[in-house]
Image (cartoon, rainbow, N blue to C red):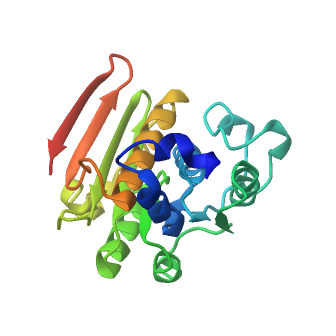
Amino acid sequence: MERYSRQMMLPEIGEEGQAKLKAAKVLIVGVGGLGSPIALYLAGAGVGTIGLVDDDVVSTSNLHRQVLYSEAQTGELKALCASMKLTALNSDIQINASSRRLTEENAHELIGQYDIVVDGCDNFSTRYLINDVCVELGKPYVYGAICGFEGQVAVFNYRTTKSYRDLYPDEEEMLRMPPPPKGVIGLTPAMTGSVEAMETIKIIVDFGSVLAGKLWMIDLRNLQTNIFSL
């Protein structure tokens, strides 16, 4: 257990918490800017089974923020590249990589295999799909989103009936909106994804105050943070 000794020193985790992490199964939808830190820190913490779902390939414009990948992997499938990186980081855990998009046809099958779903995607339609399937199957949904210097995280369907639809109730209006600006500094997904990973670990081990039914927001330009109840 030397690998995890530093976090096992924490009374909130200990041997019992580490055993819970080993037994946990977490699905990450999207392994881009948000998914990179989420996957790296969950793998490093020893989450026993991590699923990756992403049908995209690595591009040069990804590299300033998607720290799972290297220049040599440009043009290759992200899910497979991420799987190799995470296995190299921690060969004691299982990585299930799926190079496909989460759809209405496969969402129940994929999500049903895991305990928690963590959001690394970048569009409203996928988030509504994740939310609705998680509600139906009784799975916690750790949500995250970024834009520019701003990030936000929430936890839905965990010890509360609050869901993504409480944050954005009008799906049709959201889907009609133009895509948000693509400008972002790499530290925004780094910090936001790290908070998502922390919330996931708190749910697994059962300690601390989880953002259940709450929205955490940060602006990195001034480090102002807020937490709102939904």
Q: Residue shown at 76%/51% (left/top)?
A: 88
- Residue 126 visible in the displayed image: no
Judged left or right of residue 46, residue 158 is: left
Give the percent coordinates (x, y) of residue 222: 33, 16
Q: Based on the displayed image, in which of its 4 quarters is residue 68 positioned?
A: top right
The foreground one among 61 and 40 is 40
Q: Residue shown at 37%/58% (left/top)?
A: 205
- Residue 205 visible in the displayed image: yes
Q: Based on the displayed image, in which of its 4 quarters is residue 72 positioned?
A: top right
Give the percent coordinates (x, y) of residue 123: 45, 54
Judged left or right of residue 75, residue 149 is: left
Q: Based on the displayed image, in which of its 4 quarters is residue 97 positioned?
A: bottom right
Outermost residue toward the right? 72
Measured along the vertical axis of the image, is residue 46 above or below residue 135? above
Number of numbered discs present? 0
Measured along the vertical axis of the image, is residue 99 above or below residue 83? below
Outermost residue toward the top? 222
The foreground one among 160 and 148 is 160
Outermost residue toward the left? 229
Measured along the vertical axis of the image, is residue 186 above or below residue 87? above
The foreground one among 184 and 38 is 38
Give the percent coordinates (x, y) of residue 180: 42, 41
Q: Residue shown at 82%/46% (left/top)?
A: 73
